Image (spheres, grey):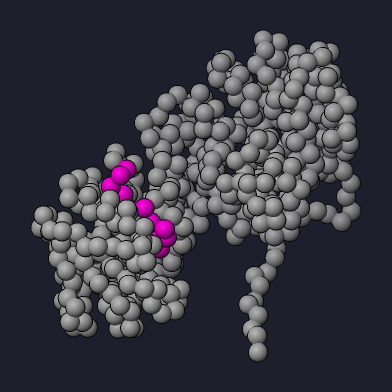
Amino acid sequence: MKIFTAAQFKQANKITTEKQGVTLEALMERTSTIVFKEMHNRLKGSPGPIKVICGVGNNGGDGLVIAKHLIQHGYYVDVYILNCSDKRSKNFLNNYHKIKEVTKNWPTLLKQGDEFPKINTNDFVVDAIFGSGLNRPLDGWVGEFIRHVNASGAFILSIDMPSGLYWNKIPKKKDAIIRANFTLSFQSPKLVFFLPEVAEFAGEVEVIDIGLDREFLRNEITEAHLIGKNEVQPLYISRKKNSHKGDYGHALIVGGSYGKIGSIGLTSLAAMRTGTGLVTAFIPACGYEILQGFVPEAMVLTDKEEKLISSVEFNFVPEVICFGVGAGKETVTYEAFKNLLLKTKKPMVIDADGLNLLNEHPDLLKSIPEHSVLTPHPKELERLLGKWKDDFDKLKKAREFVAEHNIVLIIKGAYTFIVTKERTYINNSGNPGMATAGSGDVLAGMVTGLISQGYEPLNAAVFGVYLHGKAGDIAARNKGQQALIARDIIENIGLAFLSLFEKPQTPSTSK
């Protein structure tokens, strides 16, 4: 799913009004009516008192339309207008007059110095104060009002965007942002919904189709995409009936050290489960029996050193090399990594201590094969890029980094970002139970396994991240998030593949 910028969304509105022969106000009316229908389908009657809180701009106008429909359908509604500006949008004014036609309980105007209305925990609050049009910090009494709403414990639904968030920057003061339980976003999600600094404010996000011009939406190129089942399904490469293990590649996975052989075991097993034909693990001698027992399907080569990697020697040509899981950062391991980079021309997957060695020896960066995939978690990323001002600055630095080195960067997190020099992909699968030891080792193995089979590195990164999250979701459903461990993710990779082609279930009806 494309993620549009504010400028692109404005252009979409403009083109839609021109092609469909409607005014902007009529388009907003239509949008608000669609939002109401979505709410009505979910609420099925009154959930208790509804408090619709409107600003005096376009988002406030949307809120007034929603309130009007709610009243007409028998909901108990209180409407509050936050008098936060001397300016009123045309959309707001038109709908302010219209709502007076359907209720005697006129909207309550709130201004500085007024006592805030009481909001109870069983209230349903509709946040239509600022939406996506805000470009200034919320100071003074408006900020106090938002804190009052957040402290109420009521269920909060934000229209398009939680009030207090910006479309394209991070607010300096985060205590004056609506903490929504649910956000209904128009036509596409906003990038800020997925940034670690502010993702919590949007709550659960659902995108609603408001009927913007299809041709524009289809042809417009965006810098960010949200990745789900529909986006990754076309990436899947089916197997030929007449095939053998050699058709699906040979992956070399290098890593492990004394006490950390388990990590490369997870990576090797994940590569096998993802479909690579052959896996050879190169490990210190101390891990031989452990790895042969843990992954009997893999072949094992051992270093001359007992407890660490000192020199990577092999006599075959792998389709892909994964380096770093559990490898350590000893001087001899650095030399082994350096020599491996110099003689490797195909894209690599570099994780964990491979990333730490790149940070400690930045001269190695110039030797990374083009289109290699790097998989840092936030701290490893910071060591690679340096400190950033905020998440937007982080993405800017990441794009510059991948452009300089012509690589693919997987930034692991609650929403994992795959960054290339052209665009950013944001994964929407996964759950908090995957925040567990070894989860990243599994991801490295899955991406390695896909590249080994012939997937382009970018496709392997996007597909691998989605499958990793989906396998984690399936595991969490069966075991719960708290009990989930990395091996559970591996055991559900097959089901994650199968889920790509499951048909949506039709709800059954009982007589």
Span shown in magenta: 174-187
Q: Main secondary structure of the magenta part?
A: loop
Residue 188 percent coordinates (x, y): 43, 59
Observer able to see residue 414: yes
State the residue at coordinates (21%, 66%).
Answer: 80
Observer able to see residue 366: no
Q: Is residue 368 magenta?
A: no
Q: Quadrant of residue 108?
A: bottom left
Residue 498 percent coordinates (x, y): 73, 59
Where the C terminus falls, by quadrant? bottom right
State the residue at coordinates (40%, 47%).
Answer: 192
In the image, residue 6 above or below residue 155:
above
Residue 435 percent coordinates (x, y): 60, 40
Front-lying residue, 212 or 489: 489
Q: Residue furthest bottom?
A: 511
Q: Quadrant of residue 407?
A: top right
State the residue at coordinates (40%, 45%).
Answer: 198
State the residue at coordinates (20%, 74%).
Answer: 95
In the image, residue 68 above or below residue 360:
below
Residue 381 percent coordinates (x, y): 52, 29
Q: Is residue 435 left or right of residue 226?
A: right
Q: Is residue 178 magenta?
A: yes
Q: Quadrant of residue 329?
A: top right
Front-lying residue, 337 or 345: 337
